[in-house]
Each structure stands twice: as C-alpha cells, then as structure tokens.
Image: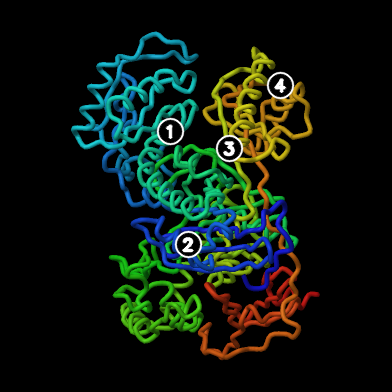
Amino acid sequence: MDNISIKWIFGGNMGKRLAIDTGGTFTDIISIDEVTGEMIALKTSSTPKNPSVGLLKSIEKVVDNEDNFSSQLETVLHGSTVATNAVLEHKFDGLGLLVTKGFRHMIEIARQSVPDGYGNSFFWVKPPRLVPLHMVREVAGRLLYDGSEIEAIDEKQTVDAVRELVEDGASCIAVCLLHSYANAAHEQHIQSIISDNFPELFVSISSEVLPEYREYERAMTTLVDVMVKPYCQTYLQHAADSIANKSKKAPFLIMQSSGGVVKHSTASKRPVTMLLSGPAAGILGAVHMAKLAGFDDILTSDVGGTSTDVSIVEKQTPMYTSSSMVESYPVKTPMLDIVTVGSGGGSIAWTDDYGNLKVGPQSAGADPGPICYGKGGTEPTVTDAALVLGRLPQKLIGGEIRLNIDDARDAFKKLGKEHEMTPEKIASGVLELAAISQVFGIRQVTTTRGRDPSKYAMVAFGGAGGLFATEVADFLNINTILSPPNPGNLCALGLHVSDVRRDYIRTMVRKQSSADDNEILDWWRELADQGITDIGAEGISKERIKLVYVADMRYLGEGHEVQVTVPNNLGKSEMVQFVWKEFHNVHDATFGFHYEGEQDVEIVNLRVQAIGEQYRPEIGINKGPKTPAKKIDTRLTYWDSWVESPIFERADLQSYQEIMGPAIIEEYGSTIVVPSKWFVRRDDYGNLIMRKKNQLESK
C-alpha cells in the first residue's frame, strides 16, 4: 500500500493476513506480511454468480505460489455485499412462512405508518412482499406474553403445512410465532419437525434470529435471514473448504454489519448479520486513519460504482442502530448506522419525461459498465462525465482498464443537444447532480439529527470518493477532507482493524415502579455468560473480552425506545439504578424533553455486546520519498473553463508537502481531484488532508 508502513502486529503469528472485500464490480484486497510489515493493496474482478471464485482468486494473487499457502497464509478476513444484493435484486423465490394461527396476514398488514416523503397513503404503493400470502401457513400452538404455553404444537398439522409450502415451490422456510422471544420451545420444536421430515429445506426461526418483541419486524428479519441463507452458506462453505485444503491453520473470519468479525460457520448460521458488512468495514478503516490524522469527529463517504454509503462518527465512535431499512424492508439487527444513496461512478445520466436531467439511481454496473469501458455500454454515466472533463486518466487500476474518451464525449454531445448545452457543461451538471445526491445522504445523518456537517471532517474513500469530495464539501460548508492511502481499498483495511463481536438481546418489559433490580441483573448476567462462551469459542481468551451492557427504555405509554449504555466502571449493584436515572438525560438529548418525576419508565429490552479484541496492525510513520514530488504530467481539465492542471503520483508525495489546486493526484484504484479553491497536504501516515485555501491564507 502506498505510503503506509506497518511497525508490527500485536500478537501476530508471522504469516500473511489477507483482508478481502467483495463488491459488485471489484474485489479489494489488502495483504499484510507479519514478518516484514509489508502492506499490499490489489483489486481483482468480482464474480457475482459465485463470490467464492473471486475470493479464492484474490488469495492466489497475493500468495507467491500454491506450495506456500500453508506456510504463508495466517488469517483470511472477508467482507461482502452478497447478502444485501440478494435483497436489492428481489431474489424472493422459494420463500415460505409459518405463523401462529390467526396471524396469516401479518406481513400484509405490516405497519400503519407511511414512509417520509409520501405525505399520505394515497400516493404510496406498498413494496413487493418478501413472501406472498399464498406462501404463508398457520400452525396451531399458542404461547402467552410471558412464555407460558396455552396450546401445544400440532405435529401432524405442522408437517402438512410445510408439505403444502414445498409443493408450492418453497425451499426456504421462516418460522415466526407469537411471543417466541419469551419462550423458544415451540419454534425449536417446529425446526426439529422440519429437519426430520424435510432435511433439504433451509430454515430460520425468529427466536434465534431476533428474540425481540414486535412480531412484524421479527418476521421480516427472519425472512431476510432465510432468503440469503442458501446463497451465503454455499459460497462461504465452498471458500472455507478451499482455504482449509490449502492452509489448515488459517481462520476464515467474516465481517458483520455491526462492525465485528466472527468465524464463517457462525456467520452462515445467521447471514442477516452480513447485511452491509462491506460498508461497515469501511467505517472502521476510516475511523482508524482519521484517528492517526488527529480527527475525532468525522463524516464518512464511501463512493463506489453504484451507490454511496455515508455515516457519522463522534469521538472516534461510530453510530449504531438496532433497526434499519434494506430498500423498503425493515431489518432489526445490530449494525453500524449507514445511509445509502443511489449515486456512484456507474450512475446513469438520463432525461425524464419533463425534460429534466437526472442522475441515477440506475447504474451501468460492471457489465456492460460505463460507455468508456468499451464493453457495450450505451448510456452516459458519471465516470464518462469525469473522463470528458479531464478529471480521470485514460486508464484505471494500473492500466488494467483503458478508457475510451471519444465514445464518452460523443455520448455527452448527444445528451447536451437535448438540453442545449455543450458536452462540458452537461458533464459538469451530471457530476453536480451526483454530488447533490451524496449531500442528501450526509444531511440524513447530520442536519436531520440536529448536527451541523460543517463541524466535521469528511473522510472520502471508495474508488470514486476523490472525484466528488470537494464538491460535496462545498455544498455543506465542510472545510476539511481526509483521503486515506489507497482509498479504494479502505474497506479491506477496516477488516484488519476489526474485533470479534457478538450481540445478545432479551425482551423483558418491566416498569421502574414495580421492577425487581435483581431480576434485571440476572438476565444481563445470563446474556454476558453466553457472550463470554461464544467469544471464547472464536478463539479469544477471556482477558481480551469486553462486555457492554445496554437497556432499551421508554416512558410508559410511548411506542419507541432509546438505548442507555452502562459505563464500564460501574459495579453490578449500580448498573440498574444508573439506567433508571440516565434514561431521562438520554431521552432529553434525543427528543428535547423529559418527564423525570412525572411519568413511570419501562425497560423493554436488555442487550449485551460481547467484544473480543483482535490482533491488529499498528501503522507506523512513513515520511515518504526524501525529495518533494514533482508533477509527472499536465492535463486539460474543465472547471468553469478549460485549465491546464498538473498531475501528481500520490506515492511520490513527501510528508507535509503541499499541492495547490487545481491539480489531479493519481494512484492505483483512485483519483483525487483538487479544485482551484483547495490545497492538499500529506501527513506522516500517508493521509492527504485537503483544506480550502482561505484557511491557509488566514494562517
């Protein structure tokens, strides 16, 4: 990796650690040699039909030869968008759902709320159901809210219901029974019935996927889990077997959307936890590099080929959420708080029925890709616009992809005629609209939550992050941008700095006025014991396990909760009293008011996060070459007019060297655009810090 040196790896075993992030277009690799400290960043084409093929090709690209697999390969870390893409592509075929008798229409009824932006239900059309009504079956058996049984499971009727679903084409069955969060026995019984009679089926039960009340969200999360299970289990197992055949000792660890890694066997049991695992790793990498650069509060902008993932980090701590939307579907699983917008390098520029210029969310993807790729693409994209404006070189990723500027220019001549604009003007408009979409995403995590984006530094990464960074920053009055080394591979770096993490939850609704504090402590203790056991099974010693205790709480009568986290310096006897008191402060900070002393408080869910500290690289100081970089070329670039801009190679930059805009800084896998109002300075860790020139003048 350019301009990064690895001092040592804490506790490493002196082999090669490989981090592989599989995206829709490219698979990004970062290899760290624990002996020499050498870090290598590479890219290879993804293989969407079978992600394990691209993953294994990535390993072969790094390891010297097959005979050295066993001696060289120490650890394989993997992040992926496979689970997310399955949902986005509506791969819903073969799903069946078993529910408690009387609740067959649960998915149809859903929630009464209408998504923001529609105003009322007259204009809103429900999204396609994950499972149609004819693929839902009721089963006898009933539990009360406290888990006590009032009707047993009818085995014959259950077998008949599953057989009907199989005859209708079901290959994946989700089971979501009323109150199973309080008692998993009925769902476990049904799971064993299906296993005995229909062993070929994939099954997910809600008491394992999400042991939490609110049956609609629990059912939807369980459906997503079982939907992606065949795909994820197949490719993860194939990759794991291939790795084991070549290197018996190398663990195969999978990134979760919560920002922690687990063994592949653990991830495949609950693949819903892999949603957004690639972007989650990117946030960890951004936090790591921002910390080295001295920034505590940051916005992350990960711009890929199809979309942009944004998040907010305060005091070097990413924001978490226990519920999210994947497209139009609610998913409740602990994950980093990420907002995704349909704006990326492959986003297509088009004209709507009213003659307005639009960009995205449609994307040219990897095949056929942008017009300039020469693979049959016919619609102009953001990448084509950047090439026409001179912002991109005519070859990418070390020359592996050569770009055809003439075809891209012809496309923008045609688009420009539709809008009576020159090719340059229309291409500039396309980049501006793409940037505005990214601005919208950042505002969702800042201004809509009462935060001023100008108070944060923005970490721009992903293959196209450097193209838009300054334009997005200008819209939001952000004055500082950080571009980490090899920004196109930052998600892979994030895998190297992740910890093992497992999350546990228990629904137990208790009012403060009548709660037994010892009961609450007992449940927290049970969840913690489970966490210590499970993290220990991942190969982490007990002294490296950290436990975080959280309570979901609300005022009596409210329908939503806030999370209260217990400080790690409190004793067990103080924990419950702390959350009862602290809840009012958290509620006030979140909603702007509290009812302390006026309204009773409820605990709804208890959570425990079990975190096992991973061995990780320590990035050392590398001041770069002994002499300052000189421009390697110049290129005509279009801003408001055509300007001759100097071109620099990022690897040639020296620590504290400043480059004044306009300039273009190129590297393997990414290009950083520096407009005339900005300047850039390299730090000792290879980060490029971009600031507005008026800051330089004020100093």
SS at mark 3? strand
Please say if 457 is above or below 204: below
Write the residue at 37% across / 65% down.
Answer: 365
Mark 3 sits on what residue? 502
C-alpha gap between disc 2 and disc 1: 29 Å
C-alpha gap between disc 2 and disc 4: 44 Å
Spot the residue most to the right. 699
Q: In this rendering, which labeled residue sits more in front, label 2 or label 4?
A: 2
Q: Earlier in the sequence, mark 3 or mark 2?
A: 2
Mark 4 sits on what residue? 597
SS at mark 1? helix
C-alpha gap between disc 1 and disc 4: 32 Å
Please say if 232 is above or below 437: above
Q: Earlier in the sequence, mark 4 or mark 3?
A: 3
C-alpha gap between disc 3 and disc 2: 34 Å
- Residue 632 location in percent, x, y? 60, 89
Q: Are marks 1 and 4 in contact (CB under 8 Å)?
A: no
Q: Earlier in the sequence, mark 2 or mark 1?
A: 1
Write the residue at 52% across / 83% down.
Answer: 640
For label 3, the crowd category at 10 Å Cα-Cα, with few meaning under 14, some 14 to 19 and many 20 or more, is many
Give the residue type at disc 2.
Ser
- Can you see residue 489? yes
Mark 1 sits on what residue? 217
**Residue nearer the viewer, 623 or 424:** 623
SS at mark 2? helix
C-alpha gap between disc 3 and disc 1: 20 Å
Spot the residue most to the top. 150
Mark 2 sits on what residue? 437
Q: Earlier in the sequence, mark 3 or mark 1?
A: 1
Q: Earlier in the sequence, mark 2 or mark 4?
A: 2
